[in-house]
Amino acid sequence: MRSIITGAVALASAMALSACSDAGSTPVSAPSGPPSAAPIGSSAGPDATGAATTTTAAVPSRTPTTKATTTPAEPGSATSDLSELRRIGVTLGAGVLIDVADDGLDRYLAVGKNGVVDFTGTSATDATMMSLEAAPVSQKNRVVIKPPFYDEDLGAGSCVADTSGTALKLETCVAGRASQIWTIVPAGDSGQFELQGRFGVISVDNGKITSSGGYTGLQTKRF
């Protein structure tokens, strides 16, 4: 009887030791925390003070793919050669309307309020009368645009200047100033042309110079 009890006690002790051994061999991992939240919003990071920074979108502007280069002529030297333009029918040195050729509308280059120049003219007026004059540079097909009505007073006169925005502006003529020199690029033999300024080719949409799309073909009409 004692041997049976002793055997049972020994068996129970062995089972307890085995259970303790199994429990001790199983590692306990620390609970994992919630995943880090991904940043939301701008790709810009915090500044030196730790405050979040934001990026302001650039204002669209009419930027050229390639700028037209011009070299002012020496005083008394020959001006730009315009013979090719005369040959294809561009009217030079006289009052003209500069018209959008293929839009089916009367859209003329016009001087507006505060000297803003755009294709807002719809009839022949003092504001829409322009004159294409040879520019004082060595390259051919370069002109300045001088509205005769604004050149009646003594002095240097007024010239249409290109801008980095869309609308152009009227300013006092300065010989050789890059923004006042325009390249007339023939577009066939019918008198049509593209007008390229310091900031690219002029493009017109519904009577407004635009930074993208629109019509680029222009023509001169007798005033």
Image: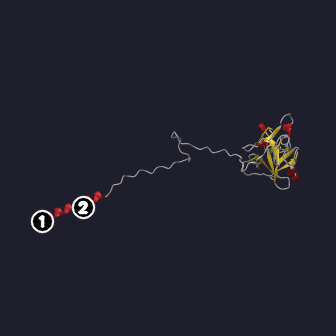
154 in relation to 44, above or below: above
Whole-Å distance between the Cαs marked 1 and 2? 23 Å
Q: Quadrant of residue 160?
A: top right
The residue at 26%/59% (across/down) is: 21
Q: Mark 2 points at which residue?
A: 18
Identify which residue, 111 or 104, lies in the foreground: 111
Q: In this view, does 93 lie to the left or right of 164?
A: right
Q: Is residue 124 left or right of residue 70?
A: right
Identify which residue, 14 or 106, lies in the foreground: 14
Identify which residue, 54 or 103, lies in the foreground: 54
Instruction: Please tell me how crowded label 2 is: few (under 14), some (14-19), or many (20+) other residues with Cα within 10 Å.
Output: few
Q: In which quarter of the image is residue 14?
A: bottom left
42 in relation to 151, above or below: below
Q: Name the residue under label 1.
A: 3
Image quadrant containing the N terminus:
bottom left
In percent of width and height, residue 179 lies at: 76, 42
Helix, strand or loop status at disc 2: helix
Q: What amino acid is labelled 1 in the image?
A: Ser
In percent of width and height, residue 72 lies at: 80, 43
In percent of width and height, residue 23 lies at: 28, 58
Helix, strand or loop status at disc 1: helix
Image quadrant containing the C terminus:
top right
Q: Which residue lies furthest to the left in this view?
A: 1
Which is nearer the N-term, disc 1 or disc 2? 1
Q: What amino acid is labelled 2 in the image?
A: Ser
Q: Residue furthest top?
A: 154
